[in-house]
Image (spheres, helix red, strand yellow):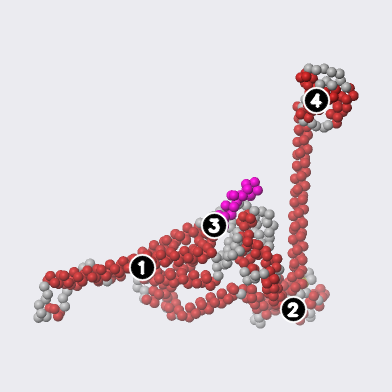
Amino acid sequence: MDLFSVLQTYRDILIVIAATLSILAYIAYTNWDAVSLWWKGFKYHNFLFSKLRSLAKNPDTAGRWFHSETVVCQDYGELYSQIHKDGDYYESSKKYLSIVGESGRKPLGTLLMLGLFAVLVLEAWGFSYTMAGFIDLSASENTRVTMTWIVAIAFAVILAFLTHMMGHELYRNGILGRIRNNWQVDDTESRPRTLDDIDFDYEIDNFTDENGPKYKQRLNRLDVNSPRKKHTFTIGALVAIIAIGIIITFVRVKTLEVAQTQDAMCQPSSATSNAALTSLDDLYSSTPPPPLESQKVSAEAVGKGESEICQATKEGSWATFGMLAILFIVLQAFATWVSFKFGFVGKHSKSAWKNTHKFNTKNQYEAAMDAKSKRISQRAQKTLGDLQSRMAKVLIDSTMNSSVSDLLKKASDRTFLRYVEQESEQSLSSRNRQTQTMLEREREHSDIISKSTSQVTADEFKAVSSNSRIEQPTDEEIESQILTETKEQSLSDEELEKQILAEAQAKKQETPEEQRARVLEKLKAEGKL
């Protein structure tokens, strides 16, 4: 029995199984947090391969905790940290969506995606049925139907993927275009030199770049490698859609030609040959046949009617092919529009949307998160308590280590929430140490830069001072120059001259203009001018 026979025989059963699995997958996807929590409990508490059974036999310690206890706490703590968020995280999620520009967007829902895929499958089934006849000319009708479904699903998957990627690419290119336009009209002195320098991945609650331009903040949070537009999927999808449309129309035309070739009415000589044939009744009838002219007129009328029927069939088929081609293009455009209007391009926009779309206020979010985190902590504490009870029964008589015995006696002090608190304190201290180390490195770097700058400035000042002493004229030269210009002589005041010279000696450096003005004042005071 070949594959097609098996699929045809068990087709109804396979359809029911596929539909059931699809429904279960959808339910699990929409309630993934509850499913994850149930699966963790199933791993630890099932009676066949319970994980608690193996963990209870491990006496290894990690500080003030058993290694087995930390395994349980870490396993539940991963899910607890994802749920246990405060109201500030809700506000950060809304701000994140606002920066990316996706506050009003929604993801492509599962029901919408399945509905669109079903429409694509039905649309592809029509031309796949036509193509199936050429895949295997000797195939039966059941085999042809089975091949039609396989080809239709394959076409639907390819077209759904290409149109989705094209719509997403067009949406992303639109955002990148707005970012580049804002960058170009920004102040040339304060804007970034280039947009190619994309910063590291900013988490939802990380706004350390809030002092930068808005378009740069948006670019830092996009799921792109570079700010350049790409048209790979757009070109590929258009080429595929045009190629598929042309090929399908060609196959339909050839199918029409085959049908008309097999129809005797549409053969040019069929009317004449049919008119020339006579029945046995006509041969043995005593009634004389009609005149040849009447037979010729009748044959021409029949041939004309049959040719008009074939021509109308051909023209109607061409009109149908054109309408199907238009429908095919419109459906692909609709699939592209859906992908353009739904979905996110921000790295964490979908997570931020999940944190905000069900809650109108910050208090609603906090209440919901508290309820979920409380349920997780209760499940985790129950699992941890079961583990501690098992370890007390297994290790109390087999261990000779006093530290293990002390930990077994103080099991009530080690709770899941206590473990989460310790992890939070360690994480906070680690971040503080990293921040302090970074600040110290920046301070050391700043000190090195300032010292080198001070050294260079001192050396330049010395060089300038020495050059100025070499090139700058003396007081006597300027004094004689002024006296020569005025051509006037007068008596000197020796005491005033000594005082002015003492002030000149006290000055370390002065410009040539200041020196000339000082000597001029001295000469006026001496009465020489």
Question: Could one spot residue 501 in this view of the protein?
Answer: yes
Circle 2 Cα neighbour tier, 10 Å, few/some/many (<14 / 14–19 / ≥20): some
In the structure shown, which secondary structural element does the residue marked by tag 4 occupy? helix
Closer to the chain start, of discs 4 and 2, is 2
* Residue 136 - label: none
**Is label 3 in contact with label 2 (beta carbons under 8 Å)?**
no
Closer to the chain start, of discs 4 and 1, is 1
Q: Which residues are magenta?
A: 174-194
**Is label 3 in contact with label 1 (beta carbons under 8 Å)?**
no
Look at 59% across and 49% down and name the residue there: 185
> Where is mark 3, residue-wise?
173
Look at 66% across and 59% down and name the residue there: 202
Look at 72% across and 72% down and name the residue there: 73
Give the mark toward the camera: 1 or 2.
1
> Where is mark 1, residue-wise?
320
| Distance Cα–Cα, label 4 vs label 2 | 99 Å
Give the mark toward the camera: 3 or 2.
3
**Residue 215, position as x, y percentages in the image:** 62, 55
Q: Amino acid at mark 3?
A: Asn
| Distance Cα–Cα, label 1 vs label 2 | 72 Å
> Where is mark 4, residue-wise?
520
Q: Amino acid at mark 2?
A: Gly
Q: Which sits in the foreground, 314 or 256? A: 314
Picture layout, residue 523 above or below residue 441: above
In the structure shown, which secondary structural element does the residue marked by tag 1 occupy? helix
Circle 4 Cα neighbour tier, 10 Å, few/some/many (<14 / 14–19 / ≥20): some
| On-image quarter of the N terminus | bottom left
* Residue 385 - label: 2
**Residue 289, position as x, y percentages in the image:** 11, 76
